[in-house]
Amino acid sequence: MTDTALALDRLRGGAPPRNHDARTIAALTANPGCARRGLMDAAGVDKDAVARALGFPAQFGQSQFAITRGNAFEAQVKADGCAELLTLLRDRLGLRLPEVAYDDLEVVGGNEGRELRYTRTRRLLARALESGEGTLFDHPLLRLDIAGQPAYLEPDVIAFQLEGRFHVIEIKSFAVIDGQAEPDQVAAAARQSAVYVLALRRLLAELGAPADRVSHEVFLVCPENFSNRPTASLLDVRPQLAVLERQLARLTRVDRILEELPDDLTFAPGDALPEAVRAVAARYAPECMATCEMAFFCRDEARACGSTGALGRSVRDDLGGVDSIGTALGLANGTIEPSPDLVETAEQLRTAARLRREALDGAA
Amino acid sequence: MPTSPDALTPDALEERIAELRAAVRRAMAAGDRVRARALRAELRGAERAWDEAVLGDGGDPADERPWAGGGAERGLLPVRDQVHQALTLLGVPAAPKLIGSVYAAFFPGEIPGARLTSLRRDEERSFRTAPYARPYYLCAGLTADLLAAARGLVTVSTWPLEQRIVGPLSPRTDFLTAAMRVAEHAGRGDAASSPQVRRLLWRFATNIPGATDAPATGVVGVVDPAVLAEAARAELDIHQAADRDQRRQAAERARAQLDEAELLFGTRLRAMRTAASAAGGVPSGAPAPAVPRRRRAAATASRKSTASRKSTAAASRTKTPRRRSSAPATGGEAAPRTSRRTSDPAPPRRRPDGASNGDDR
Ligand code: SF4
């Protein structure tokens, strides 16, 4: 084990690591500047549990109804040897009749651990590349380097091989009505699928295959017109792939974050937990509320120290370099002398303050 | 029930089930039978909710079948016999959902869907307690590569082992075989006219090329059983030879490597945990003393030679159901029992008792 891996184990305080899924990675790339989230995710810390232990339980997540419905629809499409899925693939992509092989890559897991499942995924995909053997690979376990650390990805998808080319099949339970689906949901599906496409490409690259052996077109299966009948469409995820690759490259490397931190830091439950979490710099923005389990804690912290980030990312960017609300106010009313790099910002703040005063006076 | 289990997530339900099991044990230990009975009822409710949430069998199938409403229409047979009948008709490893639809279509009454999960566990417990005491057991399909229980499939112990193996092509060949058998059955008499049968035929036909062609019945949406059987046979011809080879090879390996219980229920890992919790006093768990194997005469014809070969090879091995008094505190992530096993699969969701081994989802 590398030093970094050991350090990450320690951060988890002995708890087993959580697998990433596309949702967590898409969220991670939504706030690439946050070292706190980057570190906790790299270590596979259960952020939800940490947030609860801190007294700031997260309040988001898919509704139970949606999850149950999603599971039921997926089970239906995959029932009877993926009967419905094969029909769709034959109709839409011209899958040939002999191509029906189904390998369940999910069942090796659990007791055997992720390495074993990953190895099996790798082995079967390598075989598929070589001999063309295999058609549907259900729940492959993939791996993606996140901030310099390998993260296991638990995809809820099927990898599908058609004439030597792999596709990601994503089964979602939102309805497609007259060929249209809710754009937000399609966008989210595209973002998540892109993560799988990228991870699959990285795996094939390790096996010596070119990136285009994995299609940028995702086969999205959804229920049609309020019925339970599945329909499929091809989703081009090239834009999402480009964004994802850029954001992943921007993530601060975990080993660099670790360098700045004390050697005995851990997120294990206990009295020292709040201290430990605060020791890692966060970069709170209101968007966190929708994407990160730590959001309530970080918001509280950001407000308490008057961080400009709490006002939103655009405000923070407008205030370029002014980190605290107190400083911003001081610069605006002239009680704080700006340092040379803040002269321009201070000038704007003073102008804004004057305009506001005039407007209020005029109104009075 | 204090909280409606239906409203809970599978994870929460699993937690609840574990709690209830412990509570039942405590009540039994304290001799409080009334409380134990109440808790057990609650436990069954939670298990049902889990079945529904995870297996997606959803709701009471009786809702859709007004004709099944009367008690008289309820099958008079024990559930295991009902399942056996449906599986015998199908002749292939099948998921509880399909078993239920087939039974409802061709037999009087219906199988209470949620019972299937506990059934598999009971069968295995019964076999391990007194091997071959019953003429047949409902058991697992074995995956061709790892010889572990295939997820979500039920089979019959008296089938040839090859038939119970599930290779990469088997899900499809089994689907096509089931379609043929259902079509043949429906083609006899006037069975095809019942709505359950029509729905079942349609479900097969829409996913087999050519099966909905030129309905001789002349009614759109009604499948001609003969056309369906023909179409299924045509596609089956494409896959069958390769599938048979894979199944045969795997069956040979299984006979050489597995003991008798494993041949029926798959290579085990979490069986140890199950045993541990049963030993802890799960009331429904029959105490499982070391019972020597007997009545092997009832063993399947296909495995007789294997069985006798095994009995000498395995003479030194204990045949007592393996149990551990000290399950690991973390919930039984145990090491593989022998180095021979390459893997023991686990489903992503499983009951906390681990008893399902993932094969009855
Ligand atoms: S909520 Fe906190 S930890 Fe999560 S991304 Fe935002 S700032 Fe980072």
Image (cartoon, coloured by chain):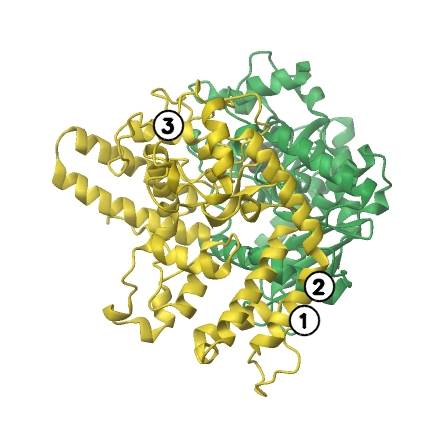
Mark number for residue B321? 3
Q: Chain of mark 2?
A: A
Tell me which chain the residue with mark 3 is part of.
B
Kindly report which numbered mark, 3 or 1, lies closer to the viewer in this rendering. Answer: 3
Task: Please name the amino acid that badge 3 sits on.
Answer: Pro
Q: Colour of chain A?
A: green
Circle count: 3
Image coordinates for residue B103, horizontal then vertical, percent: 41, 64
Residue B152, percent across and down? 49, 48
**Horizontal relation, residue B361 to residue B203: left or right:** left
Tell me if I can see residue B254 in this picture.
Answer: yes
Query: Who's the residue at 60% across and 26% down the image?
Result: A43
View quadrant of ligand 1: top right
Q: Which secondary structure lies at badge 2?
A: strand
User: For mark 2, what is the residue?
Assistant: A233
Residues at marks 3 and 1, common chain? Answer: no
The residues bearing labels 2 and 1 have C-alpha atoms spaced at a distance of: 9 Å
Q: Colour of chain B?
A: yellow
Residues behind callouts 2 and 3 on a single chain: no
Depth check: give the residue in front, B240 or A39. Answer: B240
Give the residue at mark 1: A179
Q: Looking at this view, name the residue that lies furthest to the top.
A: A263
Residue B104 figure quarter: bottom left
- Vertical position of residue A251 compared to residue A96: above or below: above
Vertical relation: A221 (above or below) B258: below
Q: From the top left corner, tell me how far across and down residue A237 is, in percent.
A: 76, 53
SS class, disc 3: loop
